[in-house]
Image (cartoon, grey):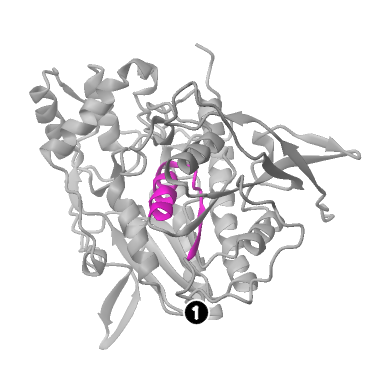
């Protein structure tokens, strides 16, 4: 295949901006944003508009610099700064920083004094348009989000818009920002999305596996001391009939003993992509000496952190639909609008759960306590275990206190999974590093329910019931009919 050459040009865009938090009569003009437009090949090229140049098709992606900094035409060398240089704030690249976990993490790290850059293709917003979905909470554009953060805190978060599956883009981003740490959230993160049809399954595996491979090669080539903090998933382990250890298990067999990676039993094409990621990262740690921490995260709930609560333009997304919504978030929205809580099958499915505030805390702890060169660490990132039935009971009780009539129904399980099983997963390593969990209390449930009630007029009840079947996935592309 012929190599697609990159072309670039600078475009100045001036605009007046009224900072968030300012009265309407106090306009302020800021410096123009600077954008570098370049062509790129990408695995989601059929999902976005194509541009034409000299008889060839290409993608137009923008690399945006903050208002205080021009994009350099001559990237700096990555060899002159040590990640261990304590005289400078650590430079953290948050890949997928426009998403649910990534946005909260980027703001948290910036607020803690880290120099932060967001790298994102913004494809998650495109998924909503494709499937006719929307966040319960109105979310601002990434540019307005970052302008608001700058206006409130005085802190700049750099922005690079592009696809990490395009290694040329990723290379330029690495050379421009020179990260000491890469926090990698930039993957298609929904199991149901990966099970819609063949094209979404292929996209999920290409985007996730190749994107992570590119990050590994970029670290090796440009920032070999960089620490990779990668978001994994507890779903890699499945639901074995033995205790789940943190990444590794010591086995005695035929008189011999060894410590081996814990067996993986993925339950969707999404979870399989995460297993492939873990294997690739473990191999490169061993072969190249990369330092990496794999955060096998449980199911996240909640929407507010200290930083996202500062202004409405900083609000995080909250998904409640059957494709991207997580269990507790979905139940709270269903209770708020008077829809029965939808328990899949028998409801005995048990998983680890954590508050979004603990997600950002865990990432910060992993950064502050980095892996050693050549070390592949695995932390199980969750704080409590619940079955689906237990979650439904907790939401029912909390809803009744608020005067809501909360009912529960069992619906046919669209997934292929055990509905009653043993589940006991270890999660001590982050606690030992200093994690102070926000446990699921009555007050927290009240807060989440009140938040759902506040925005209940934005709920599209047609998106609540599950619409993706593990067994019915096929080759034919699935589309969403117009209502």
Left-right relation of 406 to 328:
left
Give the residues in magenta.
90-111
Is residue 100 in the magenta section? yes
Q: Quadrant of residue 442?
A: top left
Identify which residue, 472 or 137, lies in the foreground. 137
Kindly identify the residue that appears in the image at 45 percent across and 26 percent down.
134
Q: Is residue 172 above or below residue 337?
A: below
Kindly identify the residue that appears in the image at 28 percent across and 36 percent down.
327
Say which quadrant the N terminus sits in: bottom right
Callout 1 secondary element: helix
Q: Is residue 358 above or below residue 466?
A: below
Left-right relation of 373 to 263:
right
Is residue 35 in the magenta section? no
Identify which residue, 149 or 232, lies in the foreground. 149
Identify which residue, 404 or 262, lies in the foreground. 404
Q: Is residue 441 above or below residue 392?
A: below
Q: Position of residue 87 (x, y in %)?
A: 47, 73
Q: Is residue 207 above or below residue 29?
A: below
Task: Identify the residue at the far right of this view.
Answer: 54
Q: Position of residue 338 (x, y in %)?
A: 22, 16
Q: Position of residue 455 (x, y in %)?
A: 32, 21
Where is mark 1, residue-wise?
286
């Amino acid at each position: 295949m012929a190599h697609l050459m990159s072309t670039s040009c600078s475009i100045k865009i001036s605009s007046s901006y009224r900072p968030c938090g300012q009265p309407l009569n106090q306009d302020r003009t800021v410096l123009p944003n600077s954008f570098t437009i370049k062509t790129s090949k990408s695995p989601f090229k059929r999902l976005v508009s194509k541009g034409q140049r000299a008889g060839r098709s290409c993608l137009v992606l923008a690399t945006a610099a903050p208002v205080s900094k021009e994009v350099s035409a001559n990237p700096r060398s990555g060899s002159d700064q040590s990640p261990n240089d304590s005289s400078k704030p650590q430079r953290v690249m948050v890949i997928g920083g426009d998403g649910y976990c990534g946005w909260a993490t980027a703001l948290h790290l910036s607020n803690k004094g880290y120099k932060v850059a967001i790298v994102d293709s913004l494809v998650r917003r495109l998924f909503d348009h494709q499937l006719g979905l929307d966040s319960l909470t109105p979310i601002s554009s990434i540019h307005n989000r970052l302008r608001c953060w700058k206006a409130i805190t005085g802190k700049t978060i750099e922005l690079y818009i592009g696809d990490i599956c395009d290694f040329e883009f990723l290379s330029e981003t690495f050379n421009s920002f020179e990260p000491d740490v890469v926090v990698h959230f930039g993957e298609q993160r929904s199991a149901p999305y990966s099970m819609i049809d063949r094209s979404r399954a292929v996209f999920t595996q290409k985007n996730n596996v190749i994107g992570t491979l590119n990050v590994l090669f970029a670290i090796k080539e440009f920032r070999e001391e960089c620490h990779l903090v990668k978001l994994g998933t507890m779903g890699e382990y499945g639901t074995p009939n033995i205790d789940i250890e943190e990444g590794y298990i010591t086995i005695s067999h035929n008189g011999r003993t060894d410590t081996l990676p814990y067996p993986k039993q993925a339950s969707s094409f999404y979870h399989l992509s995460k297993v492939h990621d873990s294997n690739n990262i473990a191999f490169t740690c061993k072969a190249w000496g990369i330092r990496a921490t794999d955060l096998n995260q449980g199911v996240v709930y909640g929407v507010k952190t200290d930083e996202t609560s500062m202004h409405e333009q900083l609000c995080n997304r909250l998904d409640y639909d059957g494709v991207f919504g997580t269990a507790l978030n979905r139940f709270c929205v269903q209770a708020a609008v008077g829809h029965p809580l939808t328990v899949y099958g028998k409801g005995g499915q048990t998983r680890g759960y954590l508050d979004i505030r603990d997600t950002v805390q865990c990432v910060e702890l992993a950064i502050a306590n980095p892996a050693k060169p050549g070390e592949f660490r695995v932390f199980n990132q969750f704080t409590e275990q619940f079955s689906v039935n237990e979650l439904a009971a907790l939401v029912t009780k909390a809803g009744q206190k608020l005067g809501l009539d909360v009912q529960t129904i069992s619906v046919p399980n669209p997934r292929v999974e055990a509905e009653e099983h043993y589940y006991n997963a270890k999660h001590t390593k982050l606690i030992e590093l200093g994690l102070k969990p926000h446990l699921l209390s009555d007050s927290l449930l009240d807060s989440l329910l009140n938040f759902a009630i506040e925005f209940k007029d934005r709920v599209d009840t047609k998106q609540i019931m599950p619409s993706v079947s593990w067994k019915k996935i096929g080759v034919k592309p699935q589309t969403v009919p117009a209502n």
